[in-house]
Image (tube, rainbow, N blue to C red):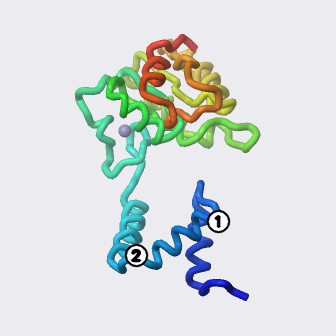
């Protein structure tokens, strides 16, 4: 016997398929939506479709943005000779929130993970190497301190060293396995200031 209508069940299933949303949360959200004014539901649906259709990768750093170049890459106030490599856009946002980093970024969209079958060609590494043909003086590797993050950092270090460009790793004041986005700004800045040569 179906406890709810087929429509509600479908909505619950769709919501439960999202990351971090369990069966209970999906139910709660579904019933909340059913009770929302129609205009609000329409606005929510439209916002999701608009975001999906209009968000793109920055031509330079590959973060998610609405423009060809993201605000950081298009800013003349940023030091374009220093590139901080992060795993995802959320990590970039975490460093941006500190307001103290003046260089630019490179977003890998993942990390090397032999266990999950994610190799160097599955993340934006080639694009990073292409950027190094410009005037770059330092690459700061700020991948997470997880096994995947460390593996990626080592790989990048080996890749860049022969070019003669300085390559550094943020200090491991960052808790092991910790996602950068959950770490407070003071810790992030300390990790940046305490970076060491790779
Ligand atoms: Zn950019």
Given residues 64 and 192, the one toward you in this image is 192
Compare marks 2 and 1 and give the one earlier in the sequence.
Answer: 1
The residue positioned 54% from the left and 17% from the top of the image is 171
Marks 2/1: CA–CA distance = 20 Å
| Residue 174 spot, x, y in % from top left | 56, 24
| Residue 73 spot, x, y in % from top left | 32, 35
Question: What label does residue 36 carry, if any?
Answer: 2
| Residue 116 spot, x, y in % from top left | 73, 44
The residue positioned 69% from the left and 86% from the top of the image is 2
SS at mark 2?
Answer: loop
Q: Relative to 179, is 142 above or below? A: above
Q: Relative to 62, is 36 above or below? A: below
Task: Tell whether 74 sits left or right of 137.
Answer: left
Marks 2/1 in contact by CB < 8 Å: the verdict is no
| Residue 145 spot, x, y in % from top left | 61, 27
> Which residue lies under the disc numbered 1?
23
Which of the 4 image quadrants contains residue 45? bottom left
Q: Quadrant of ligand 1?
A: top left
Q: Quadrant of the N terminus?
A: bottom right
The residue positioned 45% from the left and 25% from the top of the image is 132
């Amino acid at each position: 016997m179906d406890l709810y209508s087929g429509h509600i069940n479908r909505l619950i299933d769709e919501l439960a398929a999202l990351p971090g949303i369990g069966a209970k949360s999906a139910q709660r959200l579904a019933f909340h939506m059913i009770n929302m004014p129609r205009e609000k539901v329409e606005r929510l649906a439209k916002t999701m479709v608009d975001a999906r259709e209009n968000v793109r990768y920055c031509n330079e750093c590959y973060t998610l943005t609405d423009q060809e170049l993201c605000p950081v890459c298009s800013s003349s106030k940023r030091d374009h000779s220093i590139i901080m490599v992060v795993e995802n856009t959320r990590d970039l946002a975490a460093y941006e929130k500190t307001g103290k980093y003046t260089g630019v970024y490179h977003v890998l969209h993942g990390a090397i993970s032999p266990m999950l079958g994610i190799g160097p060609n599955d993340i934006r590494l080639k694009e990073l190497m292409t950027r190094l043909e410009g005037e770059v003086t330092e690459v700061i590797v700020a991948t997470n301190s997880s096994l995947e993050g460390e593996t990626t950092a080592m790989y990048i270090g080996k890749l860049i060293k022969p070019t003669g460009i300085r390559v550094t790793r943020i200090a491991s004041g960052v808790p092991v396995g910790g996602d950068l986005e959950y770490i407070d700004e003071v810790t992030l800045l300390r990790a940046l200031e305490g970076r060491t040569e790779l």
